[in-house]
Image (cartoon, rainbow, N blue to C red):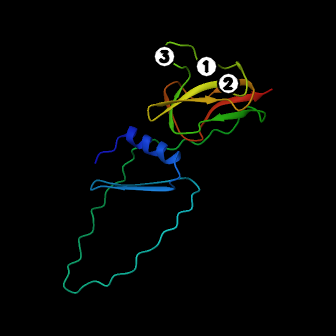
Amino acid sequence: MELSVTDLRELVTALSQSDIVELTLKSSDFELTLRKPGAMVSAVAPAPVAPRVDTVAPAAPPVTEPVSAAPAVVPAAPPGKGSDLLPISSPMVGTFYRSPAPEEPAFVGVGDRITSGQTVCIIEAMKLMNELEAEISGEIVEILVENAQPVEFGQTLMLVRPV
């Protein structure tokens, strides 16, 4: 079983939008466990099984280097450049787009005034375009993400000075 970066992103997005707390995928090539941050997972240890005398213990599996299929989690940038700035953060893993289409103007730019409920960008996840609406009114001070850049859940996309 091959798992591409796109497949991994789709799995992470599906997990974040579901009630599933932990997901484990196993194949002959790898084992991947995804767990929601802060989720409490209870595990029950299997009962010990006494080895049979006439069985041969299997050889230990070969030690392999872990495969890094996803980019490192990008921590949300703290509101810098003044304590009066508020972040607009990504609600999901996906791809950040500043405009509704490549040839159209960006939803917002640095210095623009926004109102609560105004669309400020699009996050594409699993081939769905999700419009991100501002929850605050104010002025866009900084846009921290480049167009068409992958973003993580909770990553700060923009900084806003509330009015």
> Percent position (x, y) of residue 139?
73, 23
Label located before the other in sequence (2 or 1): 1
Assess whether mark 1 and mark 3 are in contact (beta carbons under 8 angstroms).
no
Residue under numbered circle 1:
107
> Percent position (x, y) of residue 140?
70, 24
Looking at the image, the residue that sits furthest to the front is 19
Q: Secondary structure at mark 1?
A: loop
Residue under numbered circle 2:
118
- Depth check, mark 2 against mark 1: the one in front is 2
Identified by mark 3, the residue type is: Pro
Side (left or right) of 115 relative to 58 = right
Identified by mark 1, the residue type is: Phe
Cα separation between marks 3 and 2: 20 Å
Residue 51 appearing in the image: yes
Label located before the other in sequence (3 or 2): 3
> Percent position (x, y) of residue 135?
70, 32
Assess whether mark 1 and mark 2 are in contact (beta carbons under 8 angstroms).
yes
Total numbered labels: 3
Q: Secondary structure at mark 2?
A: loop
> Percent position (x, y) of residue 100?
53, 20
Occupied quadrant, residue 130: top right
Residue under numbered circle 3:
102
Crowdedness near tag 1: few (<14), some (14–19) or many (≥20) residues, C-alpha within 10 Å: some
Side (left or right) of 80 relative to 59 = right
- Camera-side residue of 45 and 150: 45
